[in-house]
Image: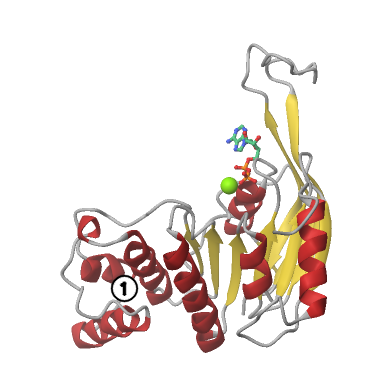
Amino acid sequence: MGKIEIQHLTKDFPNRRRNARPGDDSGLQFGDRIEVLRDIDLTFDRGEMICILGPSGCGKSTLLKIIAGFENPSTGRVLIDDKPVCGPSSNHIFVFQHSGLLPWMTVWQNVGMGLRHMPGNGQRQEKIQEYIDLVDLTGFENYFPYQLSGGMQRRAELARALAVNPDMLIMDEPFSGLDFLTHMKMREEVVNMHEFIGKTILLVTHNIDDALIMGDRVVLMSGRPSEVKLMRKLAFEHPRNYEEEPELNELREELYFMLGVSYAV
Ligand SMILES: Nc1ncnc2c1ncn2[C@@H]1O[C@H](COP(=O)(O)OP(=O)(O)O)[C@@H](O)[C@H]1O
Ligand SMILES: [Mg+2]
C-alpha cells in the first residue's frame, strides 16, 4: 500500500498583496492568480522513501498538502493506491515542519492519541510502549513536551505518527530547527525505521545531503511556477557515503549547481 500517482497537477493561489514589493516587476495585481505548481507528473512506488528538494517558496509544502488531501489541486489529480485523494485520511499521516505535540499531554498520552479508539486496553498499552521503544524514548513516557529536547520531541512525534499505522508518512522538513548532531542522528533513525517498517515516506527537505543519504528517489523542483526539474532513483545501500560513491557525489554536485551553488561544499 502507498503507491502515489500525481497526474498533470497544477495549483495556483490568488495574489493577496495589494502593493507590490519594491523591485517587483511581475506586474501582478491584487487577486491575480499566482501559478505555484505547473503540470507535475510523478509516480512513486509503494514502500519508497521519496525526498523532495527545491528552493524556498517553490511549492513543496503545497504539493505535500495536496497529496495529503488538505488542499485541492487547481487541475489534475493525485491517486493513492489507484484511488483519487479527496480529503485527509488517517492512512496518510502528516508530520509538520514545527512540533505538533500537544503540550498538555505527556509523551505517553501524545503517542496514545492516535490509538484512542483501539479496543482492548492491554493491547493499546502494548502498542504505545512498542512505538515509544522504537524511537528510543523508553523512560520518558511521563515527560511533557517542554521537558524534552528538540530531537526527542521530533522522535515523539514520529512515534505518534507511526502508532496510527498509516500506509504512508508525509514529512515536511522534519529536521528543521534541530542542531547538527541531532539532525544527523534523526536522519539515521528515519532511515533505519524506514528499512524496518517499509512504508512509503514522502519527505520534503531543503538539505541536499539528506535527500542523497536517505532517498530511494530524489525529486528536484524548480522555482515558481514549479516544475519537476530532475527525478532520479537512488539504488545505493545504506549507510551511504557520497565521498566513496562517485555516482552519488556527481549527483550531489549536479544538485548543488541546479540549486544555484556553483561548487559543492
Ligand atoms: N493558502 C495560500 N494562499 C495563498 N498563497 C499561498 C498559500 N499557500 C502557499 N501560498 C504561496 O505558494 C507558494 C509556495 O508555498 P509553499 O508550498 O509553502 O513553499 P515551500 O514549502 O516550497 O517553501 C508561496 O509563494 C506561498 O506564498
Ligand atoms: Mg514549506
Say what amino acid the circle numbered 1 marks. Leu
Q: What element carries label 1?
A: helix
Foreground residue among 69 and 251: 251
**Percent position of residue 134, x then y:** 37, 83
Res 23 visible = yes
Q: Residue at x 81, y 52 (%)?
A: 258
Residue 127 figure quarter: bottom left
Res 8 visible = no
On the rendered structure, is 205 left or right of 163?
Answer: right
Residue 228 figure quarter: bottom right
Instruction: Establish if 189 lies above or below 79.
Output: below
Quadrant the N terminus occupies: bottom right
**Percent position of residue 232, x then y:** 81, 70
Q: Count how many numbered circles sit on residues in the image.
A: 1
The figure's colour scheme reads secondary structure
* Residue at image mark 1: 115
**Percent position of residue 21, x then y:** 66, 16
Q: Which residue is drawn at 49% across and 74% down?
A: 166
Q: Residue at x 60, y 49 (%)?
A: 61
On the rendered structure, is 6 left or right of 108?
Answer: right
Badge 1: residue crowd in 10 Å (few <14, some 14–19, many ≥20): some
Q: Which residue is drawn at 65% across and 65% down?
A: 209
Instruction: Establish if 41 lies above or below 135.
Output: above
Instruction: Establish if 130 lies above or below 4.
Output: below
On the rendered structure, is 75 left or right of 100?
Answer: right
